[in-house]
Image (tube, helix red, strand yellow):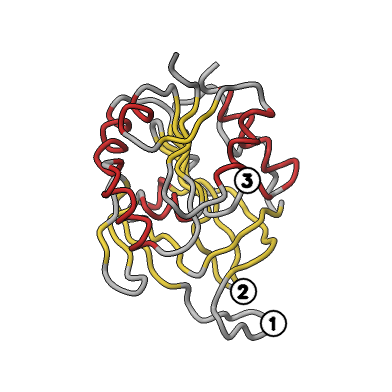
Amino acid sequence: MATDIAVVSTGMANLYSILGACWAHGVTAQIAHDRNALIDAKAVILPGVGSYPVAMQNLRNLGLDDALKEFVELKRPLMGICLGMQILFQDSNEFQLTDGLGIIPGHVRKLPPYSGDRIRENHANIGWAPIKHNQTSRPRCNWASQPTSHMEDGECMYFMHSYHVLPEDREMVDTWSTYGSQEICSSVAFENIFACQFHPEKSGASGLKVFMNFVDSIK
């Protein structure tokens, strides 16, 4: 029997924290190591931490890069988390220029120098940071529940990254977050895709609500 949610194996993520969040909300979920497990699912979560080039190579080795593009064409719900969000874009210059899935127009680049009230030598955004909704446009997924509809501006989510996404179409930006005195894209939403730079599975009750909204999309 087909599973409700396929959690894509990138070889670089704590998949069981994602599976646990799915199970806690009453849906079946399993790790997808091949095309069939992914395509047969009602929805997909693409997680990931670590190196962009290695994650992309792992997806290619499993044939999951093309399978993900095929799944998106089916117009079923897909959620990308952290590195999983970045992989949806065209390319990243982490270590070397590496092609991504190219599903979302835009690029992944190193965070700019920190310009806040203290110095960060490693230029990494690690820890809790506030988010705010895009006030210029309010992009929506075609899901039953918009993933971030419950969030108030200024609410904090948990981040852990040193590269960030630069969407070509700013109207796809769902939320912005602050990095020092600068704004960076923290989530995007359009059609059947929602992707976030923060970790909803590590962001307390508000993060788990993102999963609940995702689950609502397939019920």
Q: What element carries label 1?
A: loop
Q: Name the residue under label 1.
A: 117
> Badges 2 and 1: C-beta atoms under 8 Å apart?
yes
Q: Report which quarter residue 172 is drawn in.
A: top left
Q: Residue 6 carries which label?
A: none
Q: How crowded is mark 3: few (under 14 residues within 10 Å), some or many (20 or more)?
A: many
Relative to 127, 107 lies left or right: left
Relative to 178, 11 lies left or right: left
Which of disc 1 and disc 2 is earlier in sequence? 1
Q: Mark 2 points at which residue?
A: 180
> Badges 1 and 3: C-beta atoms under 8 Å apart?
no
Amino acid on which the number 1 mark rests in the picture = Asp
Which of disc 2 and disc 3 is earlier in sequence? 2
User: Where residue 149 appears, x then y in whole percent?
Assistant: 62, 35
User: Where residue 18 appears, x then y in whole percent?
Assistant: 59, 40
Which of disc 3 and disc 1 is earlier in sequence? 1
Q: Which of 82 and 39 is in front in this view?
A: 39
Amino acid on which the number 2 mark rests in the picture = Gly
Amino acid on which the number 3 mark rests in the picture = Pro
Q: Tell me the CA gap for discs 1 and 3.
A: 26 Å
Q: Who's the residue at 39% across and 61% down the image? A: 166
Q: Who's the residue at 29% across and 60% down the image? A: 91
User: Where residue 47 appears, x then y in whole percent?
Assistant: 49, 47
* Count of all numbered marks drawn on residues in the image: 3
Residue 1 sits above or below residue 181 on the image: above
Kindly report which numbered mark, 3 or 2, lies closer to the viewer in this rendering.
3
Q: What element carries label 2?
A: loop
Q: Tell me the CA gap for discs 2 and 1.
A: 7 Å
Q: Mark 3 points at which residue?
A: 200
